[in-house]
Image (cartoon, coloured by chain):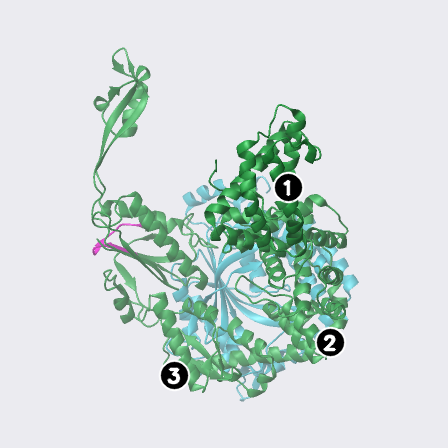
Amino acid sequence: MPNASAPKDFQGLLLALQTYWAERGCALMQGYDLEVGAGTMNPATFLRVLGPEPWNVAYVEPSRRPADGRFGENPNRLHQHHQYQVILKPSPKDVQDLYLGSLKAIGITSQDHDLRFVEDDWESPTLGAWGLGWEVWCDGMEVTQFTYFQQAGGFECRPVSAELTYGLERIAMYLQGVDNIYDLVWCTYPDGTRLTYRDVFWQNEREQSEYSFHASDPQRLLRLFDEYEKECRALVEKKLPLPAYDYCLKCSHVFNLLDARGAISVTERQGYILRVRKLAHDCARLYLATRAEMKFPALKDRALAEKELSRYGELLKVA
Amino acid sequence: MDLVFEIGTEELPASFQRPAVEWMAAQIDKALDDARLNGEGEGQRANVSTYATPRRLTLVVTAIAERAPDVRRKLSGPPAKQALQEGKWSKAAEGFARKAGVPVDALKIEGDRVVVEQHLRGQTAAEALPAILEQIIRGIPFRKSMRWDSLESDAFARPVHWIAATLDGKPVPVKFADVTSGTKTRGHRFAAPEEIPIPSARDYLPALRKVHVLADWGERSQRIAEEVARGAREASGVPRPDPELLETVTGLVEEPFAVTGWFDKEFLELPPEVLISEMRGHQKYFAVQNAKGELLPAFVAISNTKVRDPAVSRKGYERVLRARLADGKFFYDEDRKVPLRSRLEKLGRRTFLQGLGTELERVQRLRELSLWLHGATGRGDPRQLADAAELCKTDLTTGMVGEFPELQGTMGRVYALHEGVAPAVADAIFEHYLPRGAEDRLPTGDVGALLGMADRLDLMTGLFGLGKEPTGTADPFGLRRAALGFLRVTLARGYRFDVDEAMRAAQKLHRKDDAQVRERLWQFLLGRLEVLFKEKGQPDSIQAALHTGSRDLVALEKRLLALQTVREKSRAQFEATAGAFKRIGNILAQARQKGIAPVGFHQKLCSMPAERALAAALEQSRERVSTALAEKEDYLAAYAALAELRPVVDRFFDEVMVMDPDAAQRDNRLALLRSLHELFAPLADFSRLQVEKTA
């Protein structure tokens, strides 16, 4: 099914994407060192898409979705999967072609596959973020979420960033022709031994599922949520947007754990989402304000930076 | 002259494409009218064609006038005494001249005003079109628009990559966002990505076909249908008809190719609705069935690309579907482990709508309200109603409905039958959602029908009680659809009950009793009834029949039909009768305004023969009319009686003066007229009819 140039194993897929995007001017970064549900939540996306400073970056994000855990028994669903996240800011005019080039680099070409851009509007209620774009289909399978960011943290994105989020396990399953995630080959050792996805993650999937659905202590989690929220607010008060945002992420993860545990009623759910959104908004505002205070140092065009600053006059009062 | 105007974009949402070009066509037609360029020659109009694909929105307009005719017109300006001061043109006059685009010398005084003769040179199409096209591209109303790159304004549904605009082959300059128009277009994204010259109006479709783009929506849709049929034949079946999916897929491809795929037979255990939802919902595959309409383990996917080896894509399509069906099977098996009735507790943890309690509380209200409707109409089996009400929302907690919300009701029915619930109850779980839209079918049984009415009534009274009524085009809770469903089911099944009483019963369950809210809801329902009855009578007939005091919907419909029948059958006679009744209504209203409250009618006070004749005729027909109206609901018989009375009424007006100076006479006559008016009031509110005034 995939052609000869396709990466043979999971890490080969990562390497191919890393190489491709590095060659196209992206800084290669790492997944964040806190629990996140998606690469979007990494400050390298959520905060960096704000404001006028350019930013081109690519990274692998281990993404935790406690409610999706299946005790290592479902061949398609995981508590933790991996996203390949690319941010191109501002969105280049040829971003679709760049993207299609990346598919080619991993052995997926339009000569062999039905590649389609199918409308999909992305929205994250907890982040106060939304954008328009597509899910990209390869022979009917969604392989990438492609979004033009319009808002993050409740702020208009100017300029607009293009966000490409590849679902790595899915793509790897396709490339390797396996029907069970756990049969994916992660890499092959020099002696020919294969390290499989099962070897790497199966125990983690079982234990994390057990934790999310049964072992977590909802009362403690609820207290943690409150504490993390307080910490986030306190750090916003102290004008420290990045540490504050860490605690916003903590709140978001605890909320996901509570949700998976069924400890939040439908009515309460909306309330928690709004609380996280408020934190995300405050962090975004403070981040923007501090960047503005530094006069957007990453903008090479200083005249443009001055012009942009005029837009953020209100925010500067915050900083 | 011929215009070709193509906007080349990144992939547009399927549902945006046709509305966008239809809007563009209407706009250019109007703009050409305004510019007096619409058509070559007197009385001719330009021909507007539209084409749309995921990557292009196109207008092709032929026979545009080359140049608009010149016009002369006289503009009148400020008053002469302000314009000419001490023999000199004032500032006001200068301003007027500047605005009119003429030198001050051209101003003249005519009467008491300054005027100027304006000579407007007709614009050429080439001059007018750039602005027109820019306005069009900026104005297309998309449901959602976006910005891209560093652009500040000029949002569009997706980024614009090229604009091709030519008038008889010559470029028309148009600027939008970061794009300046040119004379090039592009073919299919993968099969012919190179730039090519934009074809002429005549060659547009054939030239694009050569670069693998079927630009015409109808042609592409037709080709897809053929491809799907061909694909289904490969699986020895026929496509399951699905016009909605066909429309969507037409918006997803520029050049369609069918690929047939198969899935494991074991998945045919799943209810067909589930299989179809899995195939069409996420995957946009067409289901395949045999001659008997049974699903086959096959599907047809429509590819946008003719790939080197279709077996590769087929394997891909099959893999995705297999994973989805396995998920579906998982839900189906898991869901059936938990009986519907034991899901009620879960409903208690779901909010129905903010301010209207949990789903469980809603279900309890539905139970009471549907039983109330049963009591009021005498229809449906109360035990079945109570059971159906309790179960009707339980499938909302199933994994399958969580995954496919459109299967609500369908899965409830499937699971209920699986558990051995009585078929009438299981059917009602599905049917209470009917009709789901204007085109949808209605429930076939009383249980589903009454339960569905209770559901809609509960929603409407609940939300109206919270002040969440639809405003303008905003109707976030679908109240208009709910109202139409409620009315359609009531009328189609002939349920007789007083809507006000029903609203009151519904309010009681929300622990409220608010006549003002009921009145607002009634007015809202009347508005929907007008829409529903649009085909059944002229607007004033509908108004007259609806405002007859009754809150029994079936009665209102009967009144309208009778009124319209009589009106159409003997128009002249009816107009005269209606006119006379309007007159009576007016006299009574005027008397009321003057504070005259007529007391009872007394035969012995009648002083004139015409008066006595009317009183006698009225007495004679009273019994017959009351019976016809109240018991038999024979409105036509009542109209017949009304027609018979007319000569006597006419004579009365010819010979008798109602507003007699003698107050006793006057009041007695008013009382007689009121009695006559009241007798026929259930037929129609004649004051709302627009009829020729009769002498």
The disc placed on residue B338 is 2
**Chain letter for mark 3:** B
**Residue in the image at 73% along x and 65% along y:** B347
The disc placed on residue B616 is 1
Check disc 3 and report the residue beneath it: B309
Q: Which chain is green?
A: B
Indicate the quadrant containing the C terminus of chain A: top left, top right, bottom left or bottom right: top right
Decide which of B336, A154 is in the foreground and name it.
Answer: B336
Decide which of B46, B524 is in the foreground and name it.
Answer: B524
* Distance from the alpha carbon under mark 1 to that under mark 3: 93 Å
The location of residue B239, given as percent across then percent down, is: 46, 79
For marks 2 and 3, the one nearer the N-term is 3
Report crowding for label 1: few under 14, some 14 to 19, many 20 or more residues within 10 A (C-alpha).
Answer: some
Q: Is residue B353 left or right of residue B197?
A: right
Q: Secondary structure at mark 3?
A: loop
Query: Mark 3: which amino acid?
Result: Asp
**Residue in the image at 57% along x and 84% along y:** B268
Residue B173 magenta = yes
The location of residue B187, given as percent across then percent down, is: 31, 67
Which quadrant holds residue B77?
top left
Q: Residue furthest front?
A: B609
